[in-house]
Amino acid sequence: MVEIEKIKRDTFEKLGLSENNPGVYNGKWENFSEKDAITVKSPIDGSTLGRVSVASKESYEKTLNSLKKAFAEWSDVPGPKRGMLIKKLSDALSEKKELLGRIVSLEVGKTNVEGQGEIQEMIDVGYYATGLGRQIYGNTIASERPGHVLYEKFLPLGIVGVISAFNFPSAVWSWNSFIAATVGDTVLWKPSSKASLTSVAVMGVIGDVLEKEGVPNIFGLVNGRGGVIGELLAKDQRIPLVSFTGSVKTGRHISSMVSERFGRAILELGGNNCAIVSEKADMNIALKGVGFGAMATAGQRCTSTRRVAVSEKIYEDFRKRLVEAYKKVKIGNPLENGVLVGPLIDSEAVLNYEKAIETAVKQGGKVLAGGKRHSAGNNGYYVEPTIIEAKKDMEITKEETFAPILYLFRYSGLQEAMEIHNGVPQGLSSAMFTTDLREEEIFLSSKGSDCGIANINTSTAGAEIGGAFGGEKDTGGGRESGSDSWKAYTRRITITKNYGNELPLSQGVTFDL
């Protein structure tokens, strides 16, 4: 039996955490304040982990001013040197990986493997950003005027605001922050109030490196509730770009505030991800991919598989084998070996799980596996991973429920499969399991998946940092992490140079002095 209190004490001591933790960092830690402090409870057993103080308007201003001052210096540092600083951050995170991974598990209920993986993703993004420091490129364009050169540069924006979600409490911050810092920006982080302790632990490691290296304060942290600090950040004219990860509803609100002041927004919102299983699929790969996609992180990934459409030719066999696989899954304390499904984040998430199942049954769905709370742990928020046989007209299947609920559909042809797949407002991740090249290509064409991420013979859940991450439709259209996503954190400047002895004017205009 894992002793959570013992793990907590050991982890807190080695990371310098306590029962009462300051939640604001602006080059130094603000003192802990009792006022409106966030009480952090573990979803594993409901125990209190500690408290984190929130930012006041005064400490928010102080943090923003420190980032503005740091930008003036940091943006002048050459890109390769900025990249090398980010490498040192990754090195430091690597040294504390196990401890930081434990904090993630304790605070948001991820399994030990997933908690460690969360920190490893930060480390990998940092190393990716190190290379990016030497690849901040522009384009040279053929000029129509003799004696002229036309080209583009990408320059840093200024202060980037990052509002992150609880389900990836540190990795998604690094997707934005390490990339933004490498191109010359400074970053203000407003984490989810459900993952405040992780932000304090991560920033503790980051801050130590910045201080040791004598680097200006390029990263700031302001904990607080979304309705207060999140609103301040979204409305702040001094923050040209806000990256928000969370629900569609909140994303619309954030987007409207940012756009009203002509700011930019990167939106990573809801996912209602579908996998198509063809009769030509490798059955073992499909079962593993669908099962993992639906149950990993207790269905609390934005890329979790929430719907699966299975060819009628293999439907009965697939359904039977999937239900059997669900029966074998270990549910419980995520710090114990062999556990795949840990707790949901809180009691509200459990109620939403139950409400969704009740609604699905009323709309004609049939529960094939799970469907109830689970008795694992003491006072934790555990539920059974659930499979519901669904009909195409069930409205509940068009909604995203952040829980391990999988809706199972039957299809008769590829066109019907695509109608099921694309027939929801969200458009984040997608998958097809098939060994047929033609089916693959249709799925990856304009007639196929309408999502930002498309996978063949692998799960919807998860993504590699080298590719641009994000989705379409109600998912918001944003892109983070790899490929050329770095450009979102810059401003483009088009430059014309005349090196000739004459001044030819545009559009054939003549002007003689």
Image (cartoon, rainbow, N blue to C red):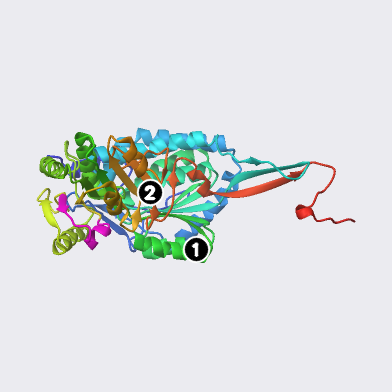
Q: Is residue 187 left or right of residue 439?
A: right
The kind of secondary structure element at disc 1 is helix
Does the magenta run of residues contain 388?
yes
The kind of secondary structure element at disc 2 is loop
x and y, in percent, of residue 337 in the image: 17, 36
Say whether residue 464 is visible.
yes
The amino acid sitting under disc 1 is: Ser
**Residue at numbered disc 1:** 259
The amino acid sitting under disc 2 is: Lys
**Residue at numbered disc 2:** 447
Say whether residue 14 is visible.
no
x and y, in percent, of residue 160 in the image: 49, 52
* Disc 1 and disc 2 in contact, CB within 8 angstroms: no
Residue visible at 51% across and 41% down in the picture: 182
Asked whether 416 or 60 is in front, the reply is: 416
Q: Nearer the viewer, mark 1 or mark 2?
A: 2
Query: From the viewer's perspective, is residue 240 above or below residue 341?
Result: below
Bounds of the magenta span?
Answer: 386-401
Asked whether 475 or 88 is in front, the reply is: 475
